[in-house]
Amino acid sequence: MENMVVFENNSFGKRLKSMVKVDFRRMCKSKLFYILVVSALIMPILMTVMMTMMDGSVTVNQQTGEETVMQGPENTWQNIGTLPDGEEMGGMDVFAMCNINMMFMIVAVFTCLFISDDFRSGYAKNLFTVRAKKSDYVISKIFAGFVCGACLLIAYFIGSMLGGAMAGLSFSLGELNPINLVMCILAKICLMPVFVSIFVLISVAAKQKAWLSICGSLGGGMILFMMVSMITPLNSTFINVILCLVGGILFALGLGAASNKVLKKSSLV
């Protein structure tokens, strides 16, 4: 009786905790993660400074002779969204599309490459064979993508403030207050699981084909991309945060279950 072997119960919580630790260790050692974060930091700085330098320049259409006057940003927060009483930049509204919302699509690159590397190296097959369940894998990947997306949003926000300061732009929020700005960023972070769960579903279906998962994820993300600015405007309130949080949880649960079924019914190679 003294030599009796007792097997420890490998509960869901322990399995998930172990899986999350492994993924976060891999993410922290990944060069891609740091490249994306640094890019998110530098991008708004370059855009703001360059557009400010081009302010007032005139371009002429050689066929019609029509002149277009470039208008640079007037406010630091144009990298985040449009103020309620603000006007769009005439002629070439770069910040209408190239703003912080791009981070929702850039996180697709991290998610797709992160997952495809598991299948390409054989790590996923070995993982499911020896210790992890497919549901643990999906939850961990959604969580890792969410954290990466949150880091990208925060880095872009910091870069926007640095770019505004370097270009000498106004930091005035007009009729808004700092709470609205905080709620806006929190709402975007809470909305991130909606996109990440889409990317995870497409990635586990494409497996080692990274190019296919990236193309599919970008295409799938674009369906909801145009709604981000409407759901998370600069004048966001606590209601926007709650709505995005609920939406993020529902999408993560629904598409996470779909990803789990895809893994169960398909080959791991």
Image (spheres, rainbow, N blue to C red):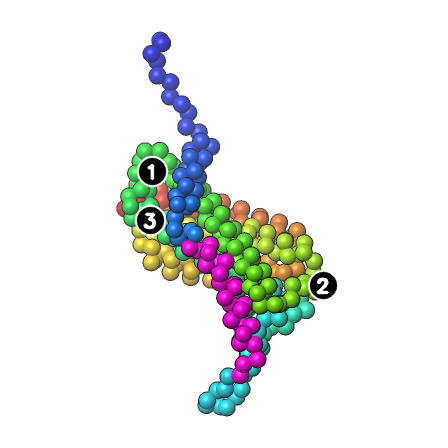
Q: Earlier in the sequence, mark 3 or mark 2?
A: 3
> Does the CB distance between marks 3 and 1 fall below 8 Å?
no
What crowding class fits label 2: few (fewer than 14 Cα within 10 Å), some (14-19), or many (20 or more)?
A: few
Residue at 58% over, 48% down: 246
* Residue at image mark 3: 117
Residue 18 image offset from top left, x and y in percent: 42, 35
* Residue at image mark 2: 175
Q: CA distance from mark 1 to mark 2?
A: 54 Å
- For the record, the magenta segment spans 35-58
Query: In terms of secondary structure, where does tag 3 sit?
Result: helix
Regarding residue 199, the answer to whether it shows in the image is no
Identify the amino acid type marked 3.
Answer: Asp
Residue 234, image quadrant: bottom right
Most common secondary structure along the magenta stretch: helix
* Residue at image mark 1: 128
| Total numbered labels | 3
Query: In terms of secondary structure, where does tag 2 sit?
Result: loop
Q: Which mark is residue 227?
A: none
Instruction: Indicate which label's residue lies in the foreground, 1 or 2.
Output: 2
Q: CA distance from mark 3 to mark 2?
A: 48 Å
What crowding class fits label 1: few (fewer than 14 Cα within 10 Å), some (14-19), or many (20 or more)?
A: some
Residue 45 image offset from top left, x and y in percent: 52, 64
> Does the CB distance between marks 1 and 2 fall below 8 Å?
no
